[in-house]
Image (cartoon, rainbow, N blue to C red):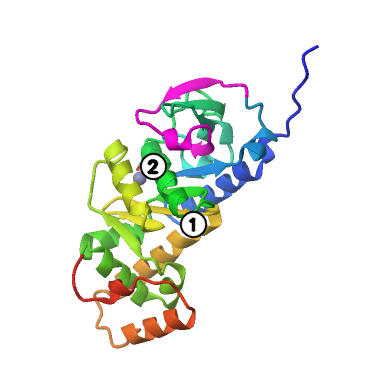
Amino acid sequence: MKKMFKTQDIFNAPFVTMIGKTAANMYRLGYDERNSGNISILLDESEAAKYLDLRNVKREIPIGFNAKELAGRILIVTASGSYFKNIAAAPAENLGIIRISPDGKTAELLWGLNGGGRLTSEFPAHVMSHVSRLSVDPNNRVILHCHPTNILAMTFVHELSEKKFTHTLWQMCTESIMIFPDGIGLLPWMVCGTNEIGEATAEKMKEFRLVVWAMHGIYGSGRSLDEAFGLIETAEKAAQIYLLTAHLPRINAITDEQLKALAESLKLDYRKDFFEETNK
Ligand code: 13P
Ligand code: ZN
């Protein structure tokens, strides 16, 4: 007799409910209008197996690049076109759980993407960024992309130098250098949804946990959704302060000496070269 496979209800899985809650928060903060933004989380096989029969592949989705570094790894990822405000109410339509095939060329759909849904158009940037982040932090699990208003606006009026952009954000809130002492990577405007922007993002992700796409949005990474989201909201808050004050005479400032004193007192491994005058 065939052994029955008893699994828990996936709609109550923390990784499903947490994505719904985070996506709704991001929608309300104005980071994710319409279908903008995408999320991916690496799942441990044992965690996924509590909810799914991992032998049951529902669909094979060609991914258009080689992801062999993640062969066999399982990810939960947002669907292309999914509205962040709707994920919590309809997770099976707006999310998919996939496993990267042994040859790295296919996503094996294990759950979700109901109604013929597709993986986010930024799947290359997500997968390639996971590979980069894992190479520097084996515990990284999350890649998060969104369109926060002030970061995006800032890329229209601020020099697009990683050094200068990071330095300005550090100056805007005391917390900035504490939360992202490693700075922010920056890419020029590029066509989104391509392997090329994925490769460029992943290259930056070897050095930074935050990467801004000029005139488009931002990528954050972390060991948890909260960590990736926290990085983005801290940068976004600093960008808001910058834009609120950019046209006003500045009569007070956090000096470089003060920022360095803070970083030294917390023993932060901060980008000392980002205090230099030269451009990058
Ligand atoms: P998707 O709906 O395909 O995830 O795209 C949203 C987005 O932000 C593209 O950069
Ligand atoms: Zn986007």
Give the residues drawn in magenta, as a range.
Answer: 55-78
Q: Residue furthest left?
A: 278
Q: Considering the image in quadrants, where does the C terminus appear?
A: bottom left
Judging by the rendered image, the residue that carries numbered circle 1 is 229
Q: Nearer the viewer, mark 1 or mark 2?
A: 2
Q: Position of residue 75 (x, y in %)?
A: 53, 38
Residue 250 shows in this picture = yes
Judging by the rendered image, the residue that carries numbered circle 2 is 128
User: Is residue 70 or residue 16 the one in the foreground?
Assistant: 70
Q: Secondary structure at mark 1?
A: helix
Q: The disc labelled 1 sits on which kind of residue?
A: Phe
Q: Which mark is residue 138?
A: none
Q: Residue furthest top?
A: 1
Q: Secondary structure at mark 2?
A: helix
User: Is residue 116 or residue 106 the one in the foreground?
Assistant: 106
Q: Residue at x 33, y 42 (%)?
A: 198
Q: Is residue 139 left or right of residue 187?
A: right
Q: Position of residue 129 (x, y in %)?
A: 40, 46
The image shows a total of numbered marks equal to 2
Q: Position of residue 257 (x, y in %)?
A: 34, 86
Pointer 1 local density, CA inside 10 Å: few below 14, some 14–19, many at least 20: many
Q: Residue at x 36, y 73 (%)?
A: 170
Q: Residue at x 40, y 48 (%)?
A: 132
Q: The disc labelled 2 sits on which kind of residue?
A: Met
Quadrant observed for ligand 1 in the rendered image: top left
Give the quarter of the image for residue 157: bottom left
Residue 255 shows in this picture = no
* Whole-number angstrom distance, CA of label 1 to CA of label 2: 19 Å
Q: Considering the image in quadrants, where does the N terminus appear?
A: top right
Q: Is residue 71 magenta?
A: yes
In the rendered view, would you say 144 is above or below 79?
below
Q: Is residue 231 magenta?
A: no
